[in-house]
Amino acid sequence: MPAHSADATTAEEGLAIQEEQAKLDSKFATDVAMQNTLLTPRFYTTDFDELDAIDVSPVREDWDALIAQMEADPNKGHFKKDESWDHVDWENMDPALKKEFIDFLISSCTAEFSGCVLYKEMKRRGNNKDITQLFQLMARDEARHAGFINDALREAGVAVNLGFLTQKKKYTFFRPKFIYYATYLSEKIGYARYITIFRHLEAHPEHRFHPIFKWFREWCNDEFSHGEAFALLMKTDPKLTSGVNVLWIKFFLTAVYATMYVRDHQRPAFHEALGVDPDWYAHEVFTKTSELSKQIFPITLDIDNPRWQRNLERLHRANVAIAEGKKQGGVAGKLKQWIGSARAALTFAALYTIPAKKHRVPESTRLEPAY
Ligand SMILES: [Fe+2]
Ligand SMILES: [Fe+2]
């Protein structure tokens, strides 16, 4: 067995290596990763038989090219510390930044690992060679990503016990089509997030306060390929991206974008340290993700409509009120939470009803990472 999860060629191998180190993992980080709220990453399960029944022959040519590229495994061995890993002075890090950054790492690790457990399970349950092969490759990548973030957390004295999480975290059931929309979007938005930070720090290296950001380019290329795979899966069945399903696509676009906005705005010190205005960052990531998602979705959200930004800010404020209410406790605190939740729901509806932009979807979905 290889010594590091970066060299593992299967998800199982990578996880076994992480498990070895789990003895040292912290209860704090694992507790955070266990949380299931609207804003924290969840674990998913689905109807694996339905997924297994997909016939990829309509997209065979693109499919084979993508699988060959993933099998070539250009990022094998990439996700581990090397000589360019600078020393991180956790002791003297500004406490607000340290808190937010650790929160960012735990949440990213949980999200990566959420992909890993879902993909690994599909590979385990399936019989369709195309599908199991794809999911095995994607699980391999996500295990490396999660393992690498956990390595970074371990230096700060906290790390997530991934084995415990697999067994104990609640799994949310999603029908396969919802898995396609949600996972496709989270892969593509993940690409857009990582590449935007990478390019920004390339131009402003003085803001690179942690070495993990140097790994983001190769990282986002993995996410890009995963997104390509889901685009191809959706392409096999035109019904998935037409008719009433367009309303579901709009729902997932709105939910994924809004969640990102609110979550990022909970971390002002982190964004300040990066030298990034969270509003600029959100708009940049939405623009890139929208551009990419035109490969398969017939609509994009009108992120330049004035109602969009206004309601995102309103949603953020509602979320702050909910958090304050929770902290406050008692009847007044509960009341504050309820009002905040009602306001958040109404604001989400306001975002959802902004008219979308329509597009003609190209014949072939295939894209290359260009940002
Ligand atoms: Fe990943
Ligand atoms: Fe991914």
Image (cartoon, rainbow, N blue to C red):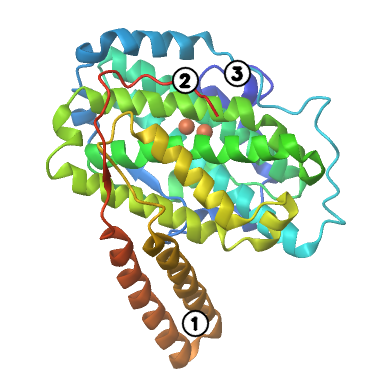
Q: Residue 371: where, in percent of width, then height? A: 55, 29
Chain-order first, disc 1 or disc 2: 1
**SS for dot 3:** loop
Residue 296 image-quadrant placement: top left
Neighbourhood count class around disc 3 (C-alpha, 10 Å): few under 14, some 14–19, many 20 upward: some
Looking at the image, is 339 positioned above or below residue 14?
below
The answer to which of marks 2 and 3 sits earlier in the sequence is: 3
The amino acid type, in three-letter code, at marker 2 is: Glu
Q: Are marks 1 and 2 in contact (CB under 8 Å)?
A: no
Q: For the residue labelled by badge 1, is the local secondary structure a helix, a strand or a loop?
A: helix
Q: Closer to the observer: label 2 or label 3?
A: 2
Q: Residue at x 62, y 28 (%)?
A: 217
Residue 27 appears anywhere in the view: no
Q: Position of residue 54 (x, y in %)?
A: 20, 22
The kind of residue on which mark 3 rests is Asn
Q: Position of residue 288 (x, y in %)?
A: 47, 38
Q: Nearer the viewer, mark 1 or mark 2?
A: 2
Q: Residue furthest bottom?
A: 331
Amino acid type indicated by mark 1 = Gly
Q: Residue 241, image x and y in percent?
A: 20, 35
Please name the residue that numbered disc 1 is placed on: 325
Q: Is residue 235 left or right of residue 40?
A: left
Q: Could you say which quadrant of the image residue 59 lies in? A: top left
- Of residue 331 and residue 70, the one placed in the foreground of this image is 70
- Location of residue 126 with respect to 164 vertically, above or below: above
Q: Nearer the viewer, residue 250 or 104?
A: 250
Circle 2 — which element? loop
**Under 8 Å from ligand 2: the CB of mark 2?**
no
Which residue was labeled with disc 3? 75
Q: CA distance from mark 1 to mark 3?
A: 45 Å
